[in-house]
Image (cartoon, rainbow, N blue to C red):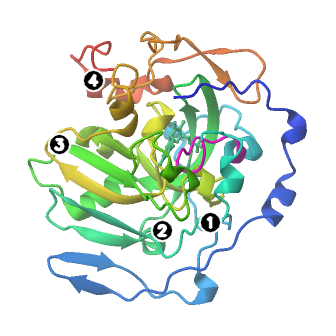
């Protein structure tokens, strides 16, 4: 992974939120009929153009972070401008500051997510139907990138477990695989061989079912912008950021450990688990401290990114230096 440090983000780069919102992009939503195909089923809903979702629009009916307080941190949130203009999304660019403008016309409607594999009820979910089906909630999570920077992000989303419960995993399902759209017409970097496309990721089923694991549809009260993984991205707050696969089109349950993009690229540097762990160095740098974007000094990195109370039991008996 290319290492660039964030120290040089200037406060003058942080624009007023109103100015930012006035630049937001409006996308046409989908009007799709309910249908059933073979054994699979498709969950779709009619939507008139006035009900269409727009990138950067306010999401209504969100359960606040205060209501799910045990899962949200009260640490200061990172500025919206930094969250939306300092991004890793290699399909668009390896330059974190270039992603937002290169992704601004990314088409996120209509958008469906196919969920299948070892499940009793495979299905294809329309993104807007999902948002209506599962009341989104705010979760303010620490976000720690393997490169050494961190943020605090007020995500809006719903537990991944909701979808998994709905499709009913079979008893032999042990892992969940995720896949990002790979569209060379919209993603300028797909033409390069910097990574194997499509970007793929995976979790153990118990990690995927954990209540902290969410599928995010927004942040700071509004629909996700393309650079943050619109319209739907994974957030697993106790793992390094690269596990948070963006713009998901496919979720598959399987018996064996699925491939993961950075692990495929360099397995000695990026393990499958990738739990935040200050005691396990990256081969080329220490993971003991982190640069919180917007702060001057460095912070100590916490085991499991500060979520040890909730997730350490998932790994009891495992050697975390081997299963990094
Ligand atoms: N998902 C896809 N499809 N492509 C990517 O390049 N980058 C990952 C992850 N998800 C990436 C991705 C990395 S390295 C990080 S740190 C986070 O997204 C960054 O998320 P953010 O830009 O919302 O902070």
**C-alpha span from label 1 to label 3:** 33 Å
Q: Are marks 1 and 2 in contact (CB under 8 Å)?
A: yes
Left or right, 306 with respect to 98, comes to left
Q: Are marks 3 and 4 in contact (CB under 8 Å)?
A: no
**C-alpha span from label 1 to label 4:** 35 Å
Q: Position of residue 162 (x, y in %)?
A: 34, 58
The residue identified by callout 3 is 174
**C-alpha span from label 1 to label 2:** 9 Å
Sequence-first disc among 1 and 2: 1
The residue identified by callout 4 is 315
Q: Residue at x 68, y 64 (%)?
A: 56
- Callout 4: helix, strand or loop? helix
Choose between 21 and 146: the one closer to the eye: 146
Ligand 1 closer than 8 Å to label 3 CB? no
The residue identified by callout 2 is 131
Can residue 152 be seen?
yes
């Amino acid at each position: 992974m290319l290492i660039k440090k964030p120290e040089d983000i200037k406060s003058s780069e942080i624009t007023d939120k109103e100015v930012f919102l006035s630049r937001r992009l409006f996308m046409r939503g989908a009007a799709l009929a309910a249908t059933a195909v073979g054994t699979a089923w498709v969950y779709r809903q009619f939507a008139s153009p006035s009900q269409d979702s727009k990138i950067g629009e306010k999401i209504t009916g969100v359960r606040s972070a205060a209501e799910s307080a045990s899962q949200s941190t009260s640490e200061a949130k990172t500025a919206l401008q930094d969250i939306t203009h300092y991004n890793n999304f290699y399909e668009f660019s390896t330059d974190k500051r270039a992603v937002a403008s290169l992704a601004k016309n990314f088409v996120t409607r209509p958008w469906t997510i196919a969920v299948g594999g070892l499940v009793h009820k495979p299905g294809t979910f329309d993104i807007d139907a999902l948002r209506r089906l599962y009341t989104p909630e705010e979760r303010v999570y620490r976000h720690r990138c393997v490169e050494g920077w961190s943020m605090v992000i007020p995500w809006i989303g719903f537990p991944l477990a909701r979808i998994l419960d709905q499709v009913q995993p079979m008893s032999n399902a042990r892992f969940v695989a995720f896949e990002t759209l790979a569209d060379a017409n919209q993603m300028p970097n797909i033409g390069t061989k910097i990574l194997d496309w499509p970007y793929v990721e995976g979790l153990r089923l118990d990690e995927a079912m954990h209540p902290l694991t969410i599928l995010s549809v927004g942040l700071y009260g509004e629909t996700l912008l393309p650079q943050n993984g619109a319209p739907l991205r994974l957030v697993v707050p106790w793992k390094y950021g690269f596990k948070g696969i963006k713009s998901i089109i496919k979720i598959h349950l399987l018996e064996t450990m699925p491939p993961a993009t950075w692990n495929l690229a360099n397995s000695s540097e990026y393990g499958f688990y990738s739990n935040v762990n200050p005691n396990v160095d990256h081969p080329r740098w220490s993971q003991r401290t982190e640069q919180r974007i917007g702060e001057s000094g460095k912070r100590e990195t916490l085991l499991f990114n500060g979520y040890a109370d909730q997730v350490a039991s998932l790994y009891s008996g495992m050697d975390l230096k081997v299963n990094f």
